């Protein structure tokens, strides 16, 4: 029988509370540091209220928490091989409780998503939350076992986190400002899609690196991850190739959209050089520990990409 404190600690580890905070930061910073300043520069105001934003953040966080719970539930045998020291289910939380937490978090997220869709008079958007909850179930039970399909599902859902904020904001702007909203729609789409593409590509890389880290357990249980399917050598080249693509895209963003000194310094020190370092680590990696280091560095780079929104806020406000 575990203590209440141990149980709560295990629950926080199960739902990856740090990742949930990152999800919340993405949506809040995107709205406050990108959307609001760009609308202000165009003489408009955000129509997506703070209350609705909070509900959206909670809805996505709850659905993600449910997804993490069910993923660990179905991976518990593999995790005994890949990361026995990090096992939560059966050690800190009884196995039979995990399914209940998954259902509770997922249903709560769907209900909150439906409510925010209703209060903004866009009930059709509630389908996205229902689909997300269902997709995470099928990902954990089926899709993640298929070559690259699970990787792309996780990456697409991560890319949707910033995009959802704009999906709620734009119809409200059109409703309030009519055709005038078209003048600001293009810059909003460019910025939000930019962060979504960055999140997508970085998550594709990180999922593949995590698969490389979990190679032994995945192979033992017949999972068709990229490292298992094509071997570690070619997987390293794939990872390095995608990282180089991200670097090139960041340089294009600088030269074409924000040729700003602050952006150049930020990109070089916090994004491009770390990405090149990760590429070097992956190409030389031969141990689970080195792949784990690369995965942790990619998470930090992702956080740095999110925090770039604060710099964008400063740049835009300086031009107003």
Image (tube, rainbow, N blue to C red):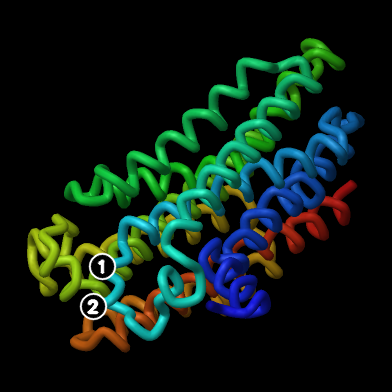
| Disc on res. 81 | 2
Q: Are marks 1 and 2 in contact (CB under 8 Å)?
A: yes
Residue 187 in sight from this viewpoint: no
Give how far across and how far down residue 199 sits, in percent: 49, 53
Q: What residue is rendered at 35% in x and 65% in y?
A: 243
Above or below residue 238? Residue 286 is below
Number of on-image labels: 2
Q: Is residue 42 left or right of residue 278?
A: right
| Disc on res. 40 | none
Q: Which residue is mark 1?
A: 77
Q: State the residue in front, 109 or 154.
A: 109
Quadrant of res 167 = top right
Q: What residue is rendered at 8% in x and 68% in y?
A: 231
Q: CA distance from mark 1 to mark 2?
A: 7 Å
Give how far across and how far down residue 65 sits, in percent: 56, 53
Give how far across and how far down residue 240 sits, in percent: 27, 69
């Amino acid at each position: 029988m575990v203590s209440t404190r141990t149980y709560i600690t295990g629950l926080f580890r199960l739902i990856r509370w740090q990742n949930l905070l990152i999800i919340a930061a993405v949506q809040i910073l995107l709205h406050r540091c990108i959307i609001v300043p760009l609308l202000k520069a165009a003489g408009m105001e955000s129509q997506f209220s703070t209350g609705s934003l909070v509900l959206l953040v909670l809805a996505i966080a709850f659905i993600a928490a449910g997804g993490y719970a069910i993923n660990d539930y179905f991976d518990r045998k593999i995790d005994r091989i890949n990361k026995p020291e990090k096992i939560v289910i059966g050690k800190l939380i009884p196995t039979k409780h995990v399914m209940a937490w998954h259902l509770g978090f997922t249903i709560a997220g769907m209900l909150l998503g439906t409510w925010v869709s209703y209060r903004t008079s866009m009930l059709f958007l509630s389908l996205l939350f229902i689909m997300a909850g269902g997709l995470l179930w099928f990902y954990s039970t089926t899709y993640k076992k298929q070559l690259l399909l699970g990787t792309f599902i996780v990456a697409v859902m991560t890319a949707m986190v910033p995009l959802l904020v704009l999906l709620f904001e734009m119809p409200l702007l059109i409703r309030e400002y009519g055709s005038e909203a078209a003048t600001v729609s293009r810059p909003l789409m460019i910025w939000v899609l930019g962060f979504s593409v960055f999140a997508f590509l970085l998550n594709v890389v990180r999922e593949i690196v995590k698969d490389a880290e979990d190679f032994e357990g995945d192979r033992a249980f017949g999972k068709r991850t990229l490292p298992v399917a094509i071997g570690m050598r070619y997987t390293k080249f794939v990872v390095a190739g995608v990282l180089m693509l991200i670097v090139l895209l960041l340089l294009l963003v600088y030269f074409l959209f924000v040729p700003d000194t602050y952006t150049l310094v930020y990109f070089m020190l916090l994004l491009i050089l770390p990405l090149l370092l990760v590429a070097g680590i992956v190409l030389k990696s031969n141990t689970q520990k080195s792949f784990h280091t690369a995965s942790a560095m990619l998470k930090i780079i992702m956080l740095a990409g999110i925090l770039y929104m604060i710099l964008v806020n400063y740049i835009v406000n300086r031009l107003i």
